[in-house]
Image (tube, rainbow, N blue to C red):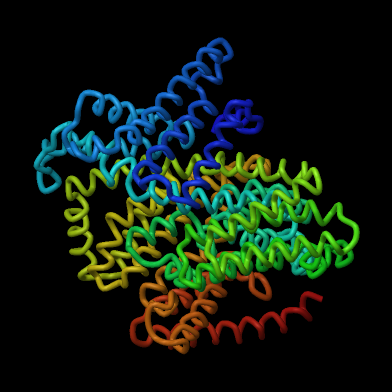
Amino acid sequence: MPDSQVAHTDTLSRPIFWIALVFSSFQLFTAAFSPLSSQVVRTIHVGFVLLMIFTLYPPWDEHERWAPLGKVLGWVLGLTGFVFGLYHWVYEADLTQRAGDLVPMDWVVGVVTVALVFEAARRVMGWGLPMICGLFLLYGLFGQHLPGAFAHRGFGLDQIVGALSFGTDGLYGTPTYVSSSYIFLFILFGAFLEQAGMIDLFNDFAMGMVGHTRGGPAKVSVISSGLMGTINGSGVANVVTTGQFTIPLMKRFGYSAAFAGGVEATSSMGGQIMPPVMGAVAFIMAETIDVPYVTIVKAAVIPAILYFVTAFWMVHLEAGRKGLNGLPKDECPNPWTAVRLRWYLLMPLIGLVALLFSGYTPLFSGTIGLALTVVLIFGAAVMTGVQGLALRGVFWVLLAVACSGFFKFGVGTFLVVVALLVALTYIRHTGADARRLAIKAMVDGARHALPVAIACALVGVIISMINLTGVAAELGGRIVSIGENSLFLALFLTMVICLVLGMGIPTIPNYIITSSLAAPVLLKLGVPLLVSHMFVFYFGIMADLTPPVALAAFAAAPIARESGLKISVQAVRIAIAGFIVPFMAVYSPALMLQSGGWTDTGYVVFKALVAIAMWGAGAIGFLITPLNWLERLYVIVAACFLVAAVPMTDEIGFASVMAFVVWHVWRSRTAKPRLA
């Protein structure tokens, strides 16, 4: 994103500020009361997104001479997209009755909306995703002229426009449905918790727990980013929030700028697989394979923990290799004091987890979690200015009544009591700071949702063309024929596809493309459905760290004051041990709780930890003492034996690791006297 465009997002003009506030209010209202059909909510959601993007990123903004004209054109394009979104609401019944039979105005709305979505995505995300989606669109239009098996039967322009702009597979398909419901709500949930002070709580807790240990500043980054991932699920957002604190701290204590940025980028991207919120892809996956969201959460728990164990282990080894110590103990905050002072911030997160695991939908759970967060923001304002127990008691009694009302009378009564509680706060005290934070959270939530929402809309082009032409079956057949002889080769090819796509597009479209093309292939090869989708999801995240276009690494670049390319190379190095986790899950589905019992799961987790430890030692070149190249190669090969689940590989792997550890401990102890 150009610097001029970043500046636009830092300070909003009053009209754009109010648009963002109305956008968030609309999403909250429709989530709580569902007054409109799902299709109408999707079209208005995309309309708001187009309006905000074109007004935030107007044409010719970098040219001072043309900037005024660009702003006017931006408003014209944005308002056009918004009005065309309302078109679906006004003529909803007519569009349903004449489905597939376009009238002239339908043509105008359909073609212009597709063009606006392409251009809006280019403005926010660059050329990568629009170019890939454009290739799929060209394939749908002209693919009948291709030679061989990839040629399709041909489709009329009216079929293409109808599928893209008025069906449930195109711009307003499943990704947009998920964006307009779950994703926006959870982004808003994270924005409210950030404004309430959750970042400070996580940073103080992480600093107090590990700041004084070897390599403490980098470990703080891993823990705080992992905790932040539980509430916002956005890698880039994690980088620009926690990274402002952790990257300078790591540099100050001896880590290179590239390594510090790589640690933050790696840790932040893991937030997308960290329950309970995870990333936007988790919600799309739940809708795609038609399983409860909590099932996705359960499958992701162990891989997420292993991912952060990997990052933690890598920074520990790097600190040992460079002799980096932590902060003085007296400079680190007390973690339990931080929890005691701000424990109430954990209530919405705990409530969210409880509701999700009680069988409630993500939409319902997110709405309640958000309501609790609003109460806590206003309640904190009351508590800071109130002396005496009387009003404090009133506050907590009302909060208890609100919660009990929810469980006894349902969400409607709960929200009413919450509103009364907020009103009481407003009457008793001005609550100016709390209201300002709440409004800022709503505006920030709308802004943070724009890249995700426009990506979800545009990748609908890919889904629509795949479903229309049936190209996935042909491509899948080719990969299946390869995988019949080697499952590992099919997995490797799938991983490469994910990583290559990740060089130009973010995680959401990456997952949608690869899950459409590769996940069915893995299913045919005997990989469980959920594991196959988690495999491509996991490598979609890793793709955001791979050069040359690594979104998280380039987000860390201005903070670390280092090249984004160098940061991405270090990020891949830090995350390299994590590459084994999805492969192990395929060969041992118990890692994702998809087979066997707790004994099987415990065994495969232990095996994964040993493999990660050895792979990390080989990548960093250090265990107890530095390793030479021969030793590094040996431990990496030993770790590879633990990944495969074929006869005797585990035995060979464990024996190799044990022999190396015994020899390495003996060598390190005998080398010390000579060094002295």
Q: Is residue 676 above or below residue 286?
A: below
Q: Is residue 648 left or right of residue 125?
A: left
Nearer to me, 463 or 484: 463
Q: Is residue 618 visible?
A: no
Q: Is residue 472 left or right of residue 448?
A: left
- Where residue 87 appears, x then y in whole percent? 34, 31
- Where residue 105 appears, x then y in whole percent? 25, 24
Residue at left offset 75%, top offset 64%: 396
Q: Is residue 487 above or below residue 434?
A: below
Q: Is residue 280 left or right of residue 517?
A: right
- Where residue 558 appears, x then y in whole percent? 65, 40
- Where residue 649 appears, x then y in whole percent? 39, 83
Nearer to me, 93 or 308: 93
Nearer to me, 525 or 251: 525
Residue at left offset 49%, top offset 34%: 124
Q: Quadrant of the N terminus?
A: top right
Residue at left offset 56%, top offset 69%: 407
Nearer to me, 107 or 281: 107
Which quadrant holds residue 643? bottom left
Q: Quadrant of the C terminus?
A: bottom right
